[in-house]
Image (cartoon, rainbow, N blue to C red):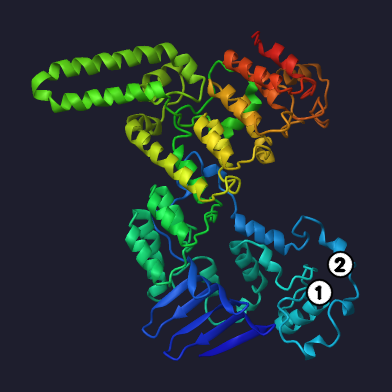
Amino acid sequence: HRFTGRFYLNRKEGYGQEIFPNGDTFQGLYYRDQRFGPGVATYSDGRQDVGLWLGHRLLKLCTSAEESFSLSDMTGYSSFLQPSVCAASAESFLSGLHTKDGTNLKQYIDLLGDESFILPPGMEHYSTNGDHLPLPPGRRRVLDQLFYGEHWEPDPYQGYERDPLSTLPLQARMQAHIHKHRLMAKNVDWDVAAVLSMNREGFGPKGPVEVQSELFIQHSSRGQYWDVSRIFQTRIVHPDVANSQGHTALIAATVNCHDDVIHLLLDMGVDINKVNSEGMSALAVCQVLLYPSLHNILTKPPVMMSPSLSEINSVLSELDLTSLTPVLNDTERIKLEEVDEQAEDGEARRDQDAADVEHSIQNKDEDMTQKQSADSTSLLSSFNATKNFLQCSSEVLNHTGLPLSCDTQETVCRVPAMNIERHMRLKTLKVLLERGADPNLARVPLPVLFLAIMAGDTEVVQTLLLFGAHTDVPLPPEYKGLYPLHVAAALPGPQGPVITEILIQTLSDLDLQACDEDEIYEPDRISMMALKLRSSRDSPGLGDGGRTALHVACQREFDYMNASKVVSILLSHRASTNLLWSGHSPLSLAVASGNHL
């Protein structure tokens, strides 16, 4: 076959064209002798395979599918959408200002200014294999000028790595390579911009690689184990191939809890930590689906809550996570199973004793309703409302003035299906973790540990910690830089003390401070405005640091019993009582909150 294009260090590089003896052609971007980036393979019959290539297989298609998972389809999570992680990584590299360990590269530019001593003199005369040798910045600059010609731009990278992109993840490496050759893309005779924008409209019918790649994702979504295996054995489909939304076969299998297909894909070499276009890994997708009703049940904090706790609760409200779907405890699960069993038995012998069965079920429902009415206040002030409560929660929510949306009513009605789904999701979650999923990778919509804590899901919290979830990594500054311990300390219900105790076992510093040191305690804000003690130009912070978990627990003005348990746990592990936030120690916040316990 014939190649038309450029070479860099004796390898195909940049945009080029290959023509094969059978009349097939490929036009696309090359990197170190292989297809790497946007490209179009055209066959003699007019079909075309279009997308981002890795070698002879497509890594990303220009088409999407209706069943693709997207965070934007989940109302309570859509506000968490962020730019692609891989794109951000590429931009970070292309800025050229930092080395692998985060040190400024400019410090190293002059350290080895004399490049004549880097390589033996005249080495090019007796050695043609330089892959294992460093490439001095001066020589790289000369080679780049010859390769790019009028499109040459100074390379901010001043290191000696022959392949500086090799330290980046695959997706970021491809993004950086595409960016590096962006100016030369204007000189090719096919629509590079359309491929990069995932627009396939101007191309011919789909070729065999595209068709098989789409089927690969589709069969994975449907759990068709043998079809997935058969397509992979043809070796024309990359196991990490994704559609235009970054929806991979692994994510498709995860969405539908096909654990056997997940194992098969991972055995094929699938990257378990690959993220989609929204920055979500398969593990993050699984956990979002584990808590599908985060925003549906209790969209606001309890009515009796005082403004003094508004800062923490505003964060939780902004996250739309105060309504996490809870976990059934053993007693409640048994009761729900008893109701289901009675319903099934009554259906089986309906002709004989239908009246008795109906009476039995009615009594059980009345008992449940009475118990829920008695406990409604505590349930509404806690994220741990039971699923039994959700089944009859419409009247309770309306009575307390909390909003009841159509989504809530649908959630209440499909509790049995959610219970089955939860069991499957938990199993899939554990499969992913056991096969190497990184619980610290994806931060969209939030780190997975935060979601589990805010759900009051003790089992998942323990599982994530067992597999290495970090407890010392905070949320971004826009969410006040809260740590997991802050969230646990603010969590109402009996799960708060339990999860706090669990987190403490993995923390060396209980006094981690949030990024709210410039905020004012709400009651103080009112008095300060009245007395005009502070100009609007002054820094509003009264203390010298942000809130600790102890501040959060002492500041709570509801669920005093569990709040006092959290405080007791923190103090028993020597949390500091002397740190100030907004001029307040934990003790003064406890006094102001009225928690005499």
Residue type for callout 1: Pro
Q: Position of residue 14 (x, y in %)?
A: 62, 79
Q: Which mark is residue 137?
A: 1
State how far apart marks 2 and 1 are (Cα): 9 Å
Q: Residue at 59% of width from left, 64% of height from top? A: 170
Helix, strand or loop for disc 1: helix
- Image coordinates of residue 123 in percent, x first then y, are 81, 86
| Residue 457 located left or right of residue 394 | right
The part of the image, by quadrant, that contains residue 63 is bottom left
> Could you tell me residue 245's position as x and y percent?
48, 58
Mark 2 and 1 residues: CB-CB less than 8 Å, in contact?
yes
Mark sitting earlier along the chain (2/1): 2
What kind of residue is marked 2? Ile
Label 2 sits on residue = 109
Number of the label disc, if any, that sits on residue 379:
none
Crowding near pointer 1: few (<14 within 10 Å), some, many (20+)?
Answer: many
- Per the image, label 2 sits on a secondary structure element best described as loop
Q: Quadrant of residue 313?
A: top right
Quarter residue 469 falls in: top right
